[in-house]
Image: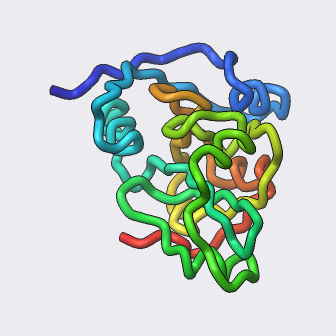
């Protein structure tokens, strides 16, 4: 049974505060998160009634010892080699979850590319550019923010590169 999405007023997380402060157009979508859901991103896509190629997950990887944020569609996975290449590195691996949480200030499954405790270099999958708007975590499980890919790239300083795999 599909979960019912509900609209929520902006505010409340560092991500939504950053968007409001920047004067960026966005919509917050809240839904009831199921702790037993196998995939946070696929759960969000289903709950919001949005195609999984428009919902993007925020992953933290380590490239040559530096933490880097990768934002890719939930319908696919992160290509670590492509991420390393996109930031001029040689090796990439998924970051330790505790290090990702400490550095971003968010919990796993709720890491947003926006409003992080420490701004990390960010790469947004190039497929984002084919959509007028995309959804990313708003900073907690069960909360997504919808905005234009161009605004997301501007606010995070992200570069666009083909880092996702279908």
Report x, y in % for residue 17: 76, 25
Q: How is the image coloured?
A: rainbow
Is residue 68 positioned above or below 47 on the image? below
Is residue 33 positioned above or below 127 on the image? above
**Quadrant showing the C terminus:** bottom left
Along the line of sight, the residue nearer the viewer: 23 or 59: 59
Query: Residue at coordinates 68% horizontally, 78% vertically from top-left?
Result: 86
The extreme left residue here reads 1
Along the line of sight, the residue nearer the viewer: 12 or 154: 12
Q: Hey, which quadrant is residue 82 in on the image?
A: bottom right
Report x, y in % for residue 73: 45, 57
Along the line of sight, the residue nearer the viewer: 133 or 126: 126
Is residue 11 positioned above or below 67 on the image? above
Report x, y in % for residue 51: 34, 48
Query: Residue at coordinates 72% horizontally, 55% vertically from top-left?
Result: 153
Badge count: 0
Query: Residue at coordinates 69% horizontally, 49% vertically from top-left?
Result: 152
Report x, y in % for residue 1: 15, 26
Is residue 9 positioned above or below 52 on the image? above
71 left or right, relative to 25:
left
144 left or right, relative to 6:
right
Q: Hey, which quadrant is residue 96 in on the image?
A: bottom right
Query: Residue at coordinates 55% horizontally, 42% vertically from top-left?
Result: 136
């Amino acid at each position: 049974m599909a979960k019912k999405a509900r609209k929520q007023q902006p505010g409340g997380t560092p991500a939504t505060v950053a968007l409001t402060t920047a004067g960026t157009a966005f919509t917050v979508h809240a839904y009831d998160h199921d702790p037993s859901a196998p995939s946070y991103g696929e759960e969000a896509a289903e709950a919001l009634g949005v195609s999984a190629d428009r919902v993007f997950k925020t992953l933290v990887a380590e490239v040559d010892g530096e933490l880097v944020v990768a934002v890719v569609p939930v319908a696919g996975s992160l290509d670590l080699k492509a991420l390393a290449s996109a930031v001029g590195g040689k090796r990439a691996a998924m970051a330790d979850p505790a290090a990702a949480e400490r550095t971003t200030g968010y919990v796993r499954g709720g890491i947003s590319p926006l409003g992080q405790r420490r701004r990390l270099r960010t790469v947004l999958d190039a497929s984002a550019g084919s959509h007028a708007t995309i959804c990313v975590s708003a900073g907690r499980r069960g909360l997504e923010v919808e905005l234009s890919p161009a605004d997301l790239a501007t606010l995070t300083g992200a570069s666009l590169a083909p880092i996702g795999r279908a």
